[in-house]
Amino acid sequence: MFEDRVAVDELTQVPPGAGLAAALAHLDRSMLNGFELVEVVKAIARQVAHYQAELLATAWESAHCPPGDETSPPERTDHPDEYAAEEIRFALTLTRRAADTLMGLAGQLVERLPAAHDALRSGQIDLAKARVLDEETAALPPPAARHVVDLVLPAAGGLTTGQLRSRLRRLVIAADPGAAAARQREALTRRHLEHGLDPDGTATLAGRHLPPDRAATAAARIDALARAAKQAGDGRTLDELRADFYLDILNGDRTPTGRPLPAGGVELVVPLSTLAGWSEQPGEIKGWGPVLAEIAAKVADQQRDRSWRYTVADGSGTVTAHGPLRRRPAAGVAGLVRARDRTCRAPGCRAPAHTADLDHTVAWERGGPTTPANLGVLCRHCHRYKHSSGVTLTQPTPGTFVWHTRLGHTYTTGPAPPT
């Protein structure tokens, strides 16, 4: 209870602003249990988002003030001052880049994406998600950007930034496939290699602006090598193995067994209409995210002689087929469940299905059957979490998972939609 008799379970009904600030000010955390503390965390997060929206709006309005001092009248100009960020930079002791970033985001949200700014002010989304909305729609004209934001905002509060970014990329591609292809062609002209020493004495070697089809195939090849070595008893972690094989390949080395380096395969999720060449709906490279229809088709064509798998979905994202491209769709239970779930089914987790465990929702030793209705994809971390004290997981319908946390909260994840 708060001193003003506002119960914790009533916090969700209090909109961010003065009222919620007053309620939170009377909080005595020592009197709350774990469930209630999580509810308060959520309320504070909404209030923080509200203040962040107000900060951005105020900073943007300050950019429209003419030169003056503490006695000046409240005048405004019709355009922001060229050096408006410097005022915020000095006032908040920010770096020049940080001040420019803050003022830039303020202008984009207030002027270009007002619905996103309103969602931040109301606590529907946080600042990190507001940044993702701005960044991922930056290439679109303002009307198209606002339309995409309107499409994704109802679900944005329940998505992680990674999930939100992936969903936005699909929508941006679908909004204008031709323009998306042109942007990609321009970006490919900027492909380059980055290298240098890190502060801890290690080094970084990475390619930027690479063709996604070739990059995905290369990454799958390295992953296959690492997993094969791990299964053969190599003591290094998978991440260590991937990094070492990456350098081995670039340096012209062979595998530790002396055998030639094997070809790598990728998994592709693609709408049936795209696979047939009837539409330009984006496909998805598992673990990478949405790609242009032409890239999905190129991946399919390039992988014909390699070991890889595909998932075909209809217009709503429902899986209609799964299996090797060169054979009839596999009817195996494991393949069907991985195709249905796509990623780990814990809330917000995006670990790809092919890297995760296939878990019996009701344990086998307790009579749980090995059927799609009792199987689900969980990454190793979330699999261990499922078995931790106080956590329960149920699957009321195939592909729908209900998590009950150790502090009494409930979260539901449904069948994975197209990202």
Image (cartoon, rainbow, N blue to C red):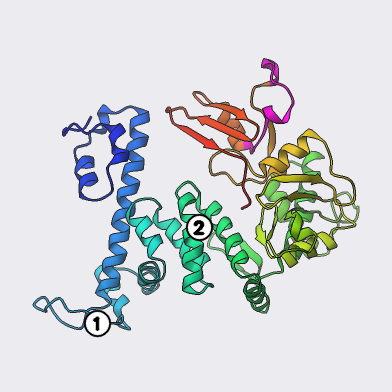
Residue name at image x 64 percent, y 22 percent: 362
As for residue 366 lying within the magenta part, the answer is yes
Residue furthest top as drawn: 366
Q: Is residue 315 magenta?
A: no
Tag 1's secondary structure? loop
Q: Earlier in the sequence, mark 2 or mark 1?
A: 1
Horizontal and vertical percent position of residue 392? 54, 25
Callout 2, which amino acid?
Leu
Q: Is residue 91 above or below residue 65?
A: above
Q: Residue furthest left?
A: 71
Q: Which residue is tagged 1?
A: 77
User: x, y percentage for residue 398?
Assistant: 65, 32
Q: Is residue 95 above or below residue 163?
A: below
The answer to which quarter of the image holds residue 402 is: top right
Against 145, is 7 above or below?
A: above
Give amino acid for label 1: Thr
Q: Residue at x 74, y 25 (%)?
A: 370
User: Which residue is tagged 2?
Assistant: 151
Q: Is residue 236 visible?
A: no
Disc 1 crowd rating (10 Å Cα; few below 14, some 14-19, many 20+) is few
**The residue stretch that appears in magenta:** 364-380
User: Which label sits in the foreground, 2 or 1?
Assistant: 2
CA gap, disc 2 to disc 1? 33 Å
The image shows residue 281 at horizontal and vertical percentages of 68, 61
